[in-house]
Amino acid sequence: MKRRTFGALAAAALAAGVAVPALAQETLTIGAVAPKTGPLAGGAAVTYWPNVQLWAHDVNARGGLQVGDAQYMVEVIEYDDQTNPGETIKAVQRLVSQDEADIVLPPYSTGLNLAAAPIYNRFGLPMVTATATTDQADQLSQQFPNVFFTLGGAQAIVESTVVAMDALRDEGVIGNKLAMVNVADAFGIELMNQAGPAFEAAGYDIVYETSYPLGTQDLSPVMKGAKAAGPDAFIAWSYPPDTFALTEQAIVEGLEVGAFFTAVGTAFPAYQARFGDDAEGVLGIGGVHADGEAFQEYAARHEEVTGAKPDYWASAMVYSSFQVLEEAIREVGSLDNPAIIEFIKGHAFDTVIGVLDFNENNNNTAFWTVGQWQDGVFKGVASTGREGAVPVLAGPDWN
Amino acid sequence: MRLTAKNWQGLALTAVLLGVAACLPLLTTAYWLTIGVTIALYTVLATSWALFSGPTHYISLATAAFFGVGTYTTGLGIEHLPYWVLPPLAGLIGAALAALVGLATLRLSGVYFVIFTLGLAEFIRQIITWGQTVSGTKGIYVLTSITEAHIYWQLLGLAGLVWLLGWLIGRSRLGFALRIIGDDEEVARHSGIHTARAKVLLFMVPGAFAAITGAVLAPRYVYIEPILAFTPMLSFQVVIMALLGGTGRLWGPVVGVIPFTFLWEGISASVPNQTTLLLGVAFLVIVYVLPRGFVGLIEDARARVNRAEGYA
């Protein structure tokens, strides 16, 4: 009896197997490559992977992706590149040649996106990056005309930070004395090198300046030094682990400043979860139009589908980059990559961060640069042309 | 130097196999070429690693350090020098660095050496980061017209060079000295062998080759930053592949590299969420089940066949 049941099941499975080719036409394979292990796995787990899940969910919930006259459900293949550019390249190859993915999403982080750019270029795949920061979009888009940039670069972030500080100085909240520190690693170094001259040109006096290695556990000497210099404002070009550690030390030391700025990671929901009311008034890189309907609706869906809140910087940009790809495919009406790339170059897209379009260097020039925790939400206070910035308020009060 | 018929046979066979391998970019899809690059890359790294670590039993985890130095040689030099100068330059820098490290550590016994080499990659990464802080540049862009096939051919040529060098060393007084050091360093010293010098000389070989490999690979990465160039994972993978193949023979590592690349590819493709775990398990299995690697297995089989023939 058992045996016969098994036989029937096998027959049914076989029948289903035969039917699969007909069904397979209804599904599009989406490829995604990003770190699940290695140094960048933490960031990808907050900013990248949940958006892949959410976007696939949203597309399928709408009944699928519209390509010409047909509508296709999407199925995602996820690969871990172990934060290793060689593995990213290999995984993209595998997605295109072995898995025959119909659409390949861009990878995560500046380094891995750029390492993968030649391979996307060779296959002619549209690559709308959302986690790569660069000030060299012109040079890169010449070499790789299929690559688009959306997240901006260090220069704009620094300029906006100066503007935000100026606003506070004009109100008399802070004076001219700045303490500025940075993490001695790629993005931190780049930001610091642009920020020093920019703030000096704006008439600020940098009373304390130092850098610390990536992965430094004890940042109390840095904060003690900053406090002893008696600054009016504190700025750290930091990464997530030290963003948290510096804030912690500032609270412990009772640093009294009119403005407190930490860089990458300040926009994470975990920052607010960790510091609660003490996060109120802290400035950082990123920001969103937090009061906008589009973002609020996106954030609610993000939490409902993935069980986690989006961050207030790149999360929405990652999702928006997927939306750009989706809309371009729908409008072109086929999976013809050269046509999709041409379409992206020449059109504006309605996304969760607002309207997204690209200049002649495939670069989106309107992005959020500085945000601030206000009423438990990290609101954008400065951008390069985004709607919905709120006025910057006086810094945190920890005493 | 007189060569026997068997030597000529081996040399000819190697040349033919390399020639066949060089046709890969002309015959297959881009995917297999990428696999080919991975295999060629680890063949160079693992074979040159085994040239030193095989006879001396010193486990070096410095591959990532030399590789990263080579990557940065190309990254920093590409703006000022023609590309073809850079890999040899990287080789010289790698060899010099290996000599320095060797002088400092190879007089010590094994375990200090392992720890020092592991720390070396981190040490150099911090120096480069410091250099960036001082000079104010961050990641470096390497934009060239070098394709995957060019990289593959360069790596194949490099593999040929490693084998040739390894073969020559094996026939030389240096090779003989190293085998004695590996068996018993005390005996070697009493026989009048300058053990420290022999070890330092040989350590320069993997140092130079790993640096050249890094220099050749840099155009593939486009964007170079310390965290990507000095990934410690590379050092461990090279050790695992070399041990899987077996370090007793010149062709041993490549016998490990090829199956491991396919195993790793299979793991990455089918269980992308557990790659690190399975890498650890693979390491354990290799150490417990195949202590002499595939080379040991093949030679045991050959010995059994020979014995069977002897009785017949």
Image (cartoon, coloured by chain):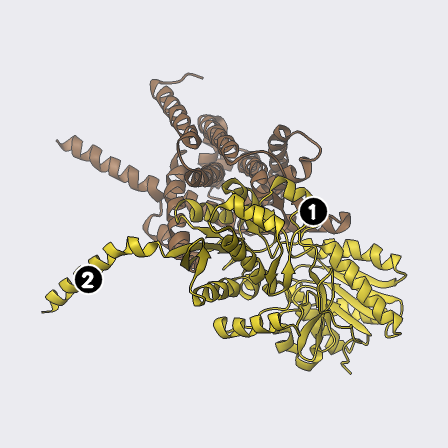
Chain colours: A yellow, B brown
In the rendered image, the quadrant that contains the N terminus of chain B is top left
Q: Helix, strand, or loop for circle 2? A: helix
Instruction: Classify residue A388 by image quadrant.
Output: bottom right
User: Residue at point 88% right, 63% down?
Assistant: A204
- Which residue, as the protein is rendered here, is positioned at the far left? A1
- Residue at the farthest top position: B2
Q: Are marks 2 and 1 on the same chain?
A: yes
Q: Secondary structure at mark 1?
A: loop
- Classify residue A295 by image quadrant: bottom right
Position of residue B52 measured from the top left corner of the image (x, y, whole percent): 49, 38
Q: Amino acid at mark 2?
A: Ala
Which is nearer the eye, B308 or B178? B308
Residue B211 at least partly seen: yes
As drawn, B249 above or below A91: above
Q: State left or right for residue A266 relative to residue B263.
A: right
Badge 1: how crowded within 10 Å, few (<14), some, or many (20+)? few
Image location of residue A187, percent across then percent down: 69, 55
- Residue in front for this viewpoint, B145 or B170: B145
Disc number placed over residue A12 in the picture, else none: 2
